[in-house]
């Protein structure tokens, strides 16, 4: 296992490469656990508010751009899939293919951010952003404000995570292209992939909670 | 004690990690060595401790007189807020894990460093950045919400620098999370051959249980504070009743973090006390496995009791009953620990050196704080005692009497290991005893005050409470002196202290098998562990 392993890649505090890899993996899993709790606050707040103001949440959701949200979902999940295949390719020692796949995954992340930005822009024009430009009138306008507040905070923090993921994937693509990784040593790609899956999974909960609820009415 | 110091030890003075990584300032600020990072933390935490302590002194001085003539009501609110924020997030939470945890966990398990040294340093910088934000609130005029940031006051009414304070705590929260993650991975992955789980010193178990709480509770606080900041900045109204939001929801989120946070403060103290007591009585710990698993019991149940902070906040009666019962349940593993410490001491030959005095003080004060916690967990009593000085006295017994005593006990115990020098034992004993006396004088009267109905967080009070308040303030003065004393005699020992030798306490544990101060990567060759912890044979 250590034969083709770059000597510098094992840091001094570790005995060998497998120990270093297991430590990195456990660290990322532990970090993911904290992220679940981090987003958990927002989902808990969502559940409580939705329970109280069911109709307002349905109405608020119907203001969101459903096709756009669906497209974003498809893009993000595809990106996650590509990063998983990239991991498989580097395990098979196909560094070039892996690098291209990582780059593609990263670009899809950028596409997600661009679409989401366009969505925000449209919502701004429609006056759906509480505290900044909110022109909604009517009986449930206040409760809908809560819906939109939760929507912006949740998708905002999620987009921040996408942005970080895009940067990480770009770095991984570059390093893979330069030949930093090989079949025996590719831990950074694997933990980046783990992180990227977390970003996917959060979105899998965001999408129905905010975009699909509108069709319940 | 210096008789055990050999010439090799003499030569090792001013050596080890203190010089091996370089002597420049940058060799410290850019270090990856867990021991140096622990020293950086210790310095920063000490500074914050005395800042928070200065605020406490102002509070006690104001309360000498019933009409609160020293500080205006507004300044008084800002003072206790600063005291709370600094003491909770910049002293108590990181105190033991980031200093002793950082220094000792890798050595105790036979590792060369933490699993993620760079992340470790990054955590310290996050701590400092968070600290800068918090210190900046002072420059811009302070915050008056109390450390709990309760809504809707913090979101709708307070005209102070809430956002600045919230950002500071948010940032330091990530320092806590990353430290916890580092400690967990280090304990799992870096143990030396033969160091299986039941051979770990209880301090390592304590750090592990603490780290789990750090990782699972702190993100909830981070997001909750982010929502407060966003509500002030952009009108995100999740806690705003005008929009149908719920201010009580804030309390749920806040205490979902802040109750477990109490266990972030006390579990490490329990770990330290276990080490100190076993050494002071030169015996194995009584009921090792119970001691280890009771800490996990506390950490786990600690996540299910947050509602006992909200008995009068309008939660349902049934929720109150359930939270009350679960809060009683926490007392079971806590009592197991106290009884096991006592059983360890039972008929033992106790050496009253300074660390042991601190440890015994810890057990006594923790017991009293824990017992009064049970009073507060009873719904009917709590309705009367909520927001009185009884609560203040209770949690100070846990946090100051418990955590700070254990922290200082640990500092004394491992001081010779970290610096290679002994401190003056007699002065240290005097300071420890003074601290115990001063502490009780400060906070015991507050139980009575609270029972008699004096509310907390008021800068004025009824004249009949003055006598006890004066006693409390005199106690605070003694306490302040006893906190300042270690600064001087420990500082003095850095330059004039006798060389400690590698094992001045004749203690067991891997940290005592290496030189004092330890070499840069701790072990010249990876140790092989063949014995259980606390293998005292005399």
Image (tube, grey):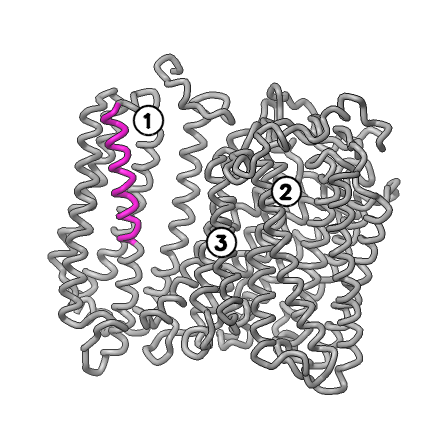
The residue under label 3 is B172
User: Quick check: B15 above or below B375?
Assistant: above
Measured in 3D between alpha carbons, the distance from the residue under mark 3 to the one under mark 2, in whole angstroms, is 18 Å
Disc 1/disc 3 C-alpha distance (Å): 32 Å
The chain identifier of the residue carrying mark 1 reads A
Position of B186 with respect to A55 (left or right) is right
**Toward the viewer: B40 or B241?**
B40
Q: Quadrant of residue A102?
A: top left
Q: Is residue B234 left or right of residue B144?
A: left
Question: From the viewer's perspective, is the residue at label 2 or at label 1 nearer?
Answer: 2
Task: Indicate which disc, 3 or 2, sits on the residue closer to the N terminus.
Answer: 2
Question: Residue furthest toward the front?
Answer: B24
From what the image shows, is residue B362 above or below residue A182?
below
Q: Is residue B318 visible?
A: no
Q: Are marks 1 and 3 on the same chain?
A: no
Q: Quadrant of the N terminus of chain B?
A: top right
Query: Residue B166: which quarter of the image?
Result: bottom left
Q: Which residue is located at x 69 percent, y 54 percent?
A: B404
Discs 2 and 1 share one subunit:
no
Identify the residue under disc 1.
A186
Considering depth in this image, is B172 or A91 the residue closer to the camera? B172
Q: Residue at x 35, y 29 (%)?
A: A187
**Disc 2 designates what residue?**
B100
Which contiguous range is marked in magenta?
A158-178
Secondary structure under tag 2 reads: helix
Q: Are marks 2 and 1 in contact (CB under 8 Å)?
A: no
């Amino acid at each position: 296992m250590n034969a083709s392993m770059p000597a510098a890649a094992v840091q001094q505090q570790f005995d060998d490469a497998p120990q270093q890899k297991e430590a990195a993996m456990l660290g990322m899993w532990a970090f993911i656990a904290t992220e679940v709790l981090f987003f958990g606050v927002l989902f808990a707040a969502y559940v409580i508010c939705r329970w109280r103001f069911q109709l307002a949440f349905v109405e608020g959701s119907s203001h969101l751009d459903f096709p756009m949200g669906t497209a974003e979902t498809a893009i993000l999940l595809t990106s996650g899939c590509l990063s998983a295949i990239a991991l498989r390719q580097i395990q098979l020692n196909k560094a070039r293919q892996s690098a291209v796949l990582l780059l593609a995954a990263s670009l899809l992340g950028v596409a997600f951010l661009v679409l989401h930005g366009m969505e925000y822009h449209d919502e701004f024009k429609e006056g759906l952003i509480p505290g900044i430009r909110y022109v909604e009138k009517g009986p449930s306008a206040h409760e809908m404000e809560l819906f939109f507040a939760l929507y912006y905070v949740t998708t905002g923090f999620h987009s921040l995570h996408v942005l970080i993921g895009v940067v990480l994937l770009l770095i991984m693509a570059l390093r893979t292209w330069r030949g930093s990784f090989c079949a025996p040593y590719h831990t950074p790609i694997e933990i980046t992939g783990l992180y990227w899956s977390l970003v996917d999974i959060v979105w899998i909960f965001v999408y129905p909670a905010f975009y699909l609820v509108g069709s319940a009415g | 004690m210096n008789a055990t110091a050999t010439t090799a030890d003499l030569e090792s003075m001013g050596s080890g990690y203190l010089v091996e990584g370089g002597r420049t300032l940058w060799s410290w600020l850019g270090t990856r060595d867990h021991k140096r990072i622990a020293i950086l933390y210790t310095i920063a935490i000490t500074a914050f401790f005395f800042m928070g302590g200065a605020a406490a002194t102002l509070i006690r001085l104001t309360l000498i007189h019933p009409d609160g003539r020293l500080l205006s009501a507004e300044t008084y609110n800002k003072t206790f807020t600063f005291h709370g924020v600094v003491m909770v997030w910049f002293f108590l939470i990181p105190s033991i894990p980031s200093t002793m945890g950082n220094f000792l966990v890798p050595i105790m398990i036979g590792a060369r460093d933490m699993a993620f040294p760079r992340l470790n340093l990054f955590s310290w910088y996050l701590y400092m950045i968070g600290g800068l934000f918090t210190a900046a609130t002072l420059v811009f005029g302070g915050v008056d919400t109390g450390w709990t940031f309760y809504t809707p006051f913090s979101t709708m009414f307070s005209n102070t620098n809430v956002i600045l304070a919230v950002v500071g705590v948010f940032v330091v929260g990530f320092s806590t999370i990353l430290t916890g993650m580092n400690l967990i991975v280090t304990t799992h992955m870096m143990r030396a051959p033969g160091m299986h789980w039941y051979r770990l010193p209880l301090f390592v178990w304590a750090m592990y249980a603490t780290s789990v709480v750090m990782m699972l509770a702190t993100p909830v606080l981070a997001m909750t504070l982010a929502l407060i900041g966003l509500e002030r900045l952009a009108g995100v109204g999740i806690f705003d009743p005008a929009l149908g939001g719920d201010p009580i929801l804030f309390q749920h989120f806040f205490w979902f973090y802040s109750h477990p946070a109490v266990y972030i403060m006390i579990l490490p103290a329990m770990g330290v006390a276990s080490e100190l007591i076993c050494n002071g009585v030169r015996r194995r710990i009584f009921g090792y496995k119970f001691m280890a698993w009771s800490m996990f019991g506390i950490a786990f149940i600690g996540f299910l009791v947050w509602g006992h902070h909200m008995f009068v906040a309008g939660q349902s009666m049934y929720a109150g009953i359930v939270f009350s019962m679960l809060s009683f349940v926490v007392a079971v593993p806590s009592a197991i620990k106290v009884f096991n410490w006592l059983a360890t001491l039972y008929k033992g030959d106790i050496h009253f050196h300074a660390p042991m005095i601190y440890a015994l003080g810890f057990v006594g004060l923790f017991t009293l704080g824990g017992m009064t916690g049970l009073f507060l967990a009873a719904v009917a009593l709590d309705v009367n005692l909520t927001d009185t000085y009884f609560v203040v006295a209770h949690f100070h017994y846990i946090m100051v009497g418990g955590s700070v005593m254990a922290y200082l006990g640990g500092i004394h115990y491992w001081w010779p290991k970290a610096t290679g020098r002994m401190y003056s034992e007699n002065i240290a004993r005097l300071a420890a005893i003074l601290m115990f006396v001063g502490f009780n004088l400060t906070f015991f009267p507050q139980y009575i005050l609270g029972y008699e109905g004096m509310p907390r967080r008021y800068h004025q009070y009824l004249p009949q409470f003055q006598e006890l308040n004066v006693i409390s303030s005199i106690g605070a003065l003694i306490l302040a002196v006893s906190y300042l004393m270690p600064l001087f005699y420990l500082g003095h020992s850095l330059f004039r202290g006798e060389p400690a030798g590698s094992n001045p306490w004749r203690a067991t544990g891997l940290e005592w098998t290496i030189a004092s101060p330890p070499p840069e990567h701790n072990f010249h060759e990876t140790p092989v562990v063949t014995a259980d912890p606390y293998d005292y044979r005399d």
